[in-house]
Amino acid sequence: MKGFVARQLSKFAGSMLVTPLVALLLIFVVDFFTIPGFFEFRLINNQLYGSLIDILVHGSPTMILAMGMTLVIATGGIDLSVGAVMAISSSVMCIMINPSIIGLNLADPQFIINNPQYTWAPLFLVFTVPLVFAAICGLWNGMLVAYWHIQPMVATLILMIAGRGIAQLVTNAIQIIIFNDTVAYVGNGFILVPFTVFIVAGVFTVAWLLTRRTAIGLFIESVGINSRSSYYAGINEKRIKLVAYAFCGFCAGIAGLMVASNLRTSDANQIGLYTELDAILAVVIGGTLMSGGRFSLLASCIGALVLQSTITSMLSYGVPASAIIAVKALVVVVVLLLYAEQIRTYGRRILAKLTTQTPATQEAAQ
Amino acid sequence: MPDPTNDIIVMTGIDKTFPGVHALQNVDFSVARGEIHALVGENGAGKSTLIKVLTGADRPDKGTIEFDGELVVVRSPLYAQGLGISTVYQEVNLCPNLTVAENLLIGRQPKTLGFAVSWKSVNFKAREYLKQLDVDIDVTQPLGSYSIAMQQMVAIARALSVANAKVLILDEPTSSLTEHETAQLFAVMRKLKGEGIAIVFITHFLDQVYEVSDRVTVMRNGAHIGTYATSSLSRMELIRLMLGRTIADLDDMTAHKMAASHHIAADSLIQADNLGLSDSVAPFDLTLHSGEVVGIAGLLGSGRTEVANLLFGVDKPDSGRMTMDGKVIHEFSPAASISRGIALCPEDRKVEGIVSELSIRENIVLAMQAGQGWFRRIGTKAQYSIADKYISLLSISTPSADQKIKNLSGGNQQKVILARWLAANPRLLILDEPTRGIDVGTKADIQRLVVSLAEEGKSCVFISSELDEVLRTSHRVIVMRDRAKASEFSGEVDEKGIMQAIAGSES
């Protein structure tokens, strides 16, 4: 039994989850001593409130982006366009609800405001069409990278810049306010915990099954480490890349819907702004190498939570929102230090001392 | 033989071991002033390791180096440069976007007032350096605007000018040059030789050895085979020395092989008619049967690997056709080949074989999984049992199947890659240099494995630089020369005939 625990423990110590978890724990420990009531929950109208809940709500879009980004980075690529794709998906969703802007007006504005059940397109299309568009954006990126051999940074930069323009075009550069209750529920609803948490769990489950219960995960890692060897081993490395980028676009689409629903508006200028950087940071904190290879979806999600907890705690301290980016940078430096080889060897030495001592002392006690 | 007192470099008893490979075994090597000394040998012979020891990139485990009559310890490439040993590598490692003059004088530009670069004198000096090589070009143009040969010249000019070079090492300088450019390079080499500079010339083009060198040193399997005056060594003899006949470890394989030959199927498995790809390999005919080992012999660059790449679908042929079981193959790609039952163990293990960060288990199941597609995943338990099976079958020495493949020695890595292809259960297994850079024991293991695979009814193509190895394992031998099929030998081993075919008609 002891041996089993030790084995599981050493397996965990070798896994990618340790570093991001340690980082998250450090933040929580600091918060525990410095922010009164940080871990308190209040139940109001059958809904939980508290700082931890805030972290989950606001961290949800980043977690979803990070999962898509993880697969892209694992293939050795990068996707800078996720923020712009978020804007596109939110604009497409809003135009599906209320297309009056582009002249397809069917009901008068007062009617829309007074009827919170109204959507122009059927509700399921309101949710699926934007996701299809987002996935197409991802496919476009994947095509440029895998089949046209454009550097991922450059290839996705194209959509990063063009995407917001496309989003503006869709809504005629007008912010469309969301009056529909169901749509607004996605980003604001509660079933004890925020509804977005269920979406994150759903995306995680799908992504995990897709990568770990099929061979796709292994192929992504293999392509990221050595794409030529993978090609010789019979892996269609282009198609693997295409799938990774398409999934990343799809995730960005979901994140876009979430944010637009939360804000109850389509704002092509603001939705998803700079989120590509958060997503990349979350993946880095999660321990996936920027050069590709081994990845962990869960570690990336925890990485996103590390980022969000920093922001939430800083807001609790009263740091102005505009200065938070600087603090975020500090957290990134600390986490990267945790990954540095020198500090790792030091930590391993301490761990080795602890593990060799415990059985010995136990035997001595017997 | 030149006068020994004229030697500028004398390396004695150099020994170097890398994990899993004895790269240099008690090697003696000397170079005299004013000679062009060719260094030849197949891949893995130890040429580059010897040069690395000489230029300070690697430290020898044993042995001494004398330079200009004095015992030296070459600590670093910089130290070697200080001594006057300059090296020009195969790939020109200069900056193509800088001008020729900048490339020549980068880091030591003449300055006025102590800081401002004086471009006038930079360009003047650059022109002067090039003039020593009888090269007259516009030094203010970017280096990239000139041909590879000219860039090579600039690299040589830089190598000569950085230090007061007494020894110039040229590592495969002609591999990307045209005939005319090569002649240009040789003219420069002869001129430098006339000035008393010793030149070490590494090449795998034997014509060039005879054209330009005074002496030739042959290396094989990390050992110094001999140093000869080029004019007194026949071409046949040189090739025999390079390819070698290792007496060690000869077992009853021939008998084994002959017994296996009874299993050779009458019908062909693969038939290539006039299959070829321009700029790669000239159209060739080839028939492969189940239960047969077909060896492909030839020197490096003779088109061996290109044949393998065509058969495996890495390259798409632009002429001829290939049939398998009588059906014409239209789709050429590794993935399609694997599903068809063709496997290739590629030549460059590091670049085309291993996936360094993945475990042994994952490396082994990779091709099998690729053959099964994305969605029918091989369960983790099944993966372990496959991996453990091959670890014991091929006696791969590792603590566990979870070890990353990059932590294994070269020989064990090669076994893992072999296991990957055996696990995919191919009908045709193409092995391109499967024994390169690995120890003798593992070599014998792999040779034996190939023969036993044929016994089981698989068809094997065995490509190797070592003629001996090809002869021992193969029922039939194809000889490649100058990127074309030169001839085919079957039945009784005709070693002399094969060597003649490898060397070409001139000998």
Image: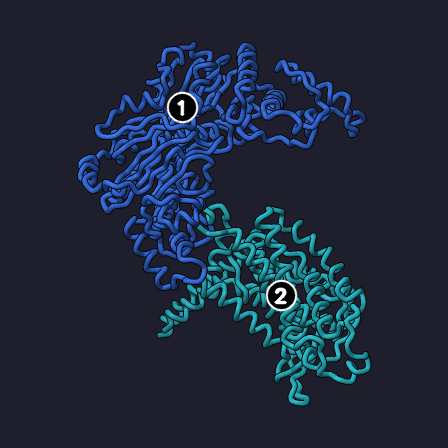
Chain colours: A cyan, B blue
- Identify the image quadrant of residue B410: top left
Asked whether B317 or A276 is in front, the reply is B317
Q: Report the residue marked by disc 1.
A: B12
Label 2: few (<14), some or many (≥20) within 10 Å? some
Residue A241, given in percent of the width and then of the height, sits at: 55, 54
Q: Are marks 2 and 1 on the same chain?
A: no
Residue B80, given in percent of the width and then of the height, sits at: 54, 26
Residue B343 vs residue A321: left or right?
Answer: left
2 and 1 marks in contact (CB < 8 Å): no
Q: What element carries label 1?
A: strand
Residue B101 vs residue B308: left or right?
Answer: right
Label 1: few (<14), some or many (≥20) within 10 Å? some
Instruction: Return the chain for callout 1.
Output: B
Q: In which quarter of the image is the N terminus of chain A?
A: bottom left
Is residue B174 among the parts visible in the rendering?
A: yes
Residue at 77% in and 80% down: A112
Q: Compared with residue B238, is residue B358 higher up or lower down, i.e. above or below?
A: below
Instruction: Return the chain for callout 2.
Output: A
Residue B73, given in percent of the width and then of the height, sits at: 49, 28
Q: Report the residue marked by disc 2.
A: A132
Residue at 45% in and 68% down: A9
Amino acid under disc 1:
Thr
- Identify the image quadrant of residue A279: bottom right
Q: In which quarter of the image is the C terminus of chain A?
A: bottom left
Asked whether B327 or A44 is in front, the reply is B327
